[in-house]
Amino acid sequence: MVKLMSVGAASVAAVGVCLAVASTLRPGVGAQVPPVAVQVPPKGNPVRKPLDEFPFMNDKERHKDSLSGEMGNMRPVIKNARGGFRFQSREAIRYKDGTAKLWSLEQKDPIAPTLRHKGPIRELTFFDESNLLITLSDESVKVWDALTGEPRKELERQTISPMWLSFAPNAQRFVTIDSEHKVVTVWDAVTLAAVAKLRAAGGDHVVGAAGLSADGKTVVMFRFRPDPSAELWDVASGQTFATLRLPSSAVAEVFAEAGKSLNYDKLQKFKSQRDTRFWEVVRSLAPTAGEPIKPSGS
């Protein structure tokens, strides 16, 4: 999963479609192609044009009336035309009419029928490592097969906030928040079964955002101003074990706009990593296997 981007930027992101080993990049998209000496063939023997593996990557028709888009690189890898290997890439695009479509870079038509919710689709993202496409409306979260566009599951009265912190690729888990912002559910991204349901401490507490540690063992429930905090939960036991508050600098730097939102750079440097100072604190406080947990006193 990557941050949502404009459709133009999504197209440029297609440089990720190829593996580092025996990779092939489309000329003009990150690849430097040396000049080729062309000999004029005899009459009746036309020049063969180089094979374009991604002929529809910048197709204008698919971007008409679009709002945003994102690229995803799916497995299993396949052979390319030059004998190397690459991911199976997909482009998901959200449109002004509230729908979305799933596209391949290799064919003109969409991979699947138009993706819809009861209301307009507000966000979408790929969980590449699980071959999933996630779409979000005001009413539900929908999970789709990112290769075929087939629907996998609808999570009604659930939301994800923020998308970029909800998925732990190595653990194959993701989190959603219920519509009342009271309960965070941890999901297995392979089986799409609920792993744990965690209810925020205190009857009047509201979860503004939720994320997972890299190992998928700790959920962080973020609350915004007037009292910004990060409540840490152990997924295995279903218990909270710490609440981080100001004036801790490791906590202060993950909040932005005076505690109204989250600071992306201080929470996630790269798509699949949680290696900032905040997550170092989370790891240091997380219980080890078999260790009894003392619930947070917050």
Image: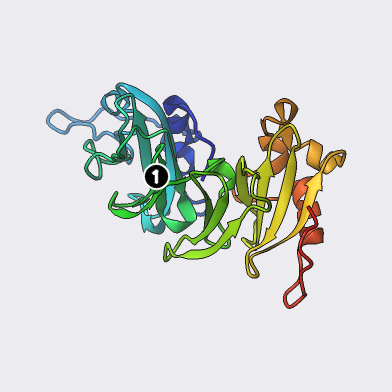
Q: In the visual, does 1 lie left or right of 27?
A: right
The answer to whether residue 237 is visible is: yes
Helix, strand or loop at label 1? It is strand
Residue that lies at the very extreme toward the front in this rendered image: 203
Query: Residue placed at 14% from the left, 28% from the top?
Result: 43
Q: Residue at x 31, y 21 (%)?
A: 65
Residue 84, horizontal then vertical, whole percent: 41, 54
| Farthest-out residue, bottom | 290
Kindly identify the amino acid type of the residue bearing the numbered disc 1.
Answer: Ser
Residue plotted at (47% across, 50% down): 127
Q: Is residue 279 above or below residue 234?
A: above
User: Which residue position is annotated with label 1?
Assistant: 140
Residue 294, percent from left and from top:
79, 67
Work out whether residue 82 or residue 79 is closer to the camera in this orientation and state it. 79
Q: Depth check: give the residue in front, 148 or 29.
A: 148
Residue 51 can be seen, yes or no: no
Q: Residue at x 12, y 31 (%)?
A: 44
Residue 90 point in image, percent of width and height = 37, 44
Q: Is residue 142 above or below residue 233?
A: above
Quarter-wise, where is residue 268 in the image? top right
Work out whether residue 288 or residue 59 is closer to the camera in this orientation and state it: 288
Applied colour scheme: rainbow
